[in-house]
Amino acid sequence: MTADPAYLLFHVEVRAVTRLTPSFVRITFTGPELDRFADNGDDQRINLVLPGPDGGPLVPPTPSAGVEDTDDAADGWYAHWLALPDDQRNPLRTYTVRQVRTERREVDVDFVLHGDGGPASRWAGSVAVGDRAQLVGPNLRHPGPTRATGWNPPPGAPTLLIVGDETAVPAVASILEGLPAGARGRVLIEVPEPDDVLPLTAPDGVQIEWVTRSGIGHGVLLSKAVRDIAGVMLAGGLPDSPARTDEALDDIPDELWDVPEPDDQPASAPVYAWLAGEAGCIAGLRRHLVKDLGLDRRSVAFMGYWREGVARVND
């Protein structure tokens, strides 16, 4: 383990709880070591470690121990967490950083409130100032990269297509705030009800459209809106695209996550698409862009944050 690993386990407490809309709440965390929390912007992923069944924190062999890779770690906090018996393991969930204020040692994370079906939902719905938790986040002092994002457009990206449901709203908001002034594109966001529409900041060339379910099935209206707009953005399809070969059309797996790195993306493409939310809906839209409209699959970042009928990674 290096002296300054890529990620650290930060011990935090709740400084503020702000209800944004009926479905969204912002929790502001503070902690003595958050001046080491790197502000990477965009859809930076972190882990929230909730109090364990005994109400206590995760206590690895070395407090604040970090690891190079939270998915494949062989030591540090993650190995300790894995080794705990199921009935003693702290709930661990993935979220997107909404804002970092390093000088104030504060980190904002926006949560979607959707009942008490999971430990994170219950916690976010009843949390109070002073409550304690832990964040696994990027280490400002690490000499190498610490980004864990799905937003990786190529340099000089073409027109942007950004799509997400309510679980992707914090990521979309952060991505939009980081866009260059000359960016152009369309953003489509689905939320449960009209009062969940949030004010977002974006360049003038980026149009934002909100779709509210209001009782209609998840993803139904979002899918229709995206298909209508994508049909205009990619009018006539792209018959010469490599993605239109029979082999490519048959080779679109149903995985939950596929984020091409900039070096792997085509030299030129009319659209860079970022899709995040319920896996079934987002997978269908990805297949439509690639199979029906001919967009090179290497120009589509696809993230199934959750799947209908299965516990969410941030529940």
Image (cartoon, helix red, strand yellow):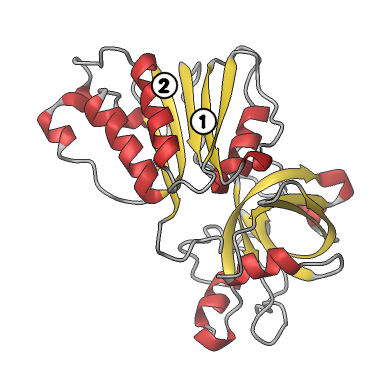
Q: Amino acid at mark 1?
A: Leu
Looking at the picture, how far across and down is residue 242, in whole percent?
21, 23
- Image quarter of the C terminus: bottom right
Looking at the picture, how far across and down is residue 295, in whole percent?
30, 24
- Image quarter of the N terminus: bottom right
Furthest residue in direction front, as rendered: 215
The answer to which quarter of the image holds residue 4 is bottom right
Q: Is residue 70 visible?
A: yes
Label 1: which secondary element: strand
Q: Residue at x 37, y 15 (%)?
A: 232
Considering only vertical position in the picture, is 67 above or below 89?
above
Q: Amino acid at mark 2?
A: Ile
Considering only vertical position in the picture, is 257 above or below 114?
above
Question: Which label's residue is closer to the chain start, 1 or 2?
Answer: 1
Q: Is 164 left or right of 124, judged from the image as shown?
A: left
Q: Is 78 left or right of 28, judged from the image as shown?
A: left
Q: Residue at x 57, y 46 (%)?
A: 192
**Depth check, front residue: 276 or 38:** 276
Mark 1 Cα-neighbour bin, 10 Å: few <14, some 14–19, many ≥20: many
Q: CA distance from mark 1 to mark 2?
A: 9 Å
Q: Residue at x 12, y 34 (%)?
A: 247
Q: Is residue 40 visible?
A: no
**Depth check, front residue: 34 or 181:** 181
Q: Is 202 left or right of 161, judged from the image as shown?
A: right
Q: Please say if the residues under marks 1 and 2 sit with CB atoms less than 8 Å apart.
A: yes
Mark 2 Cα-neighbour bin, 10 Å: few <14, some 14–19, many ≥20: some
Q: Residue at x 54, y 87 (%)?
A: 87
Looking at the picture, how far across and down is residue 104, in whole percent?
88, 48
Determine which residue is flagged by label 2.
229
Label 2: which secondary element: helix
- Identify the disc placed on residue 162: none
Determine which residue is flagged by label 1.
188
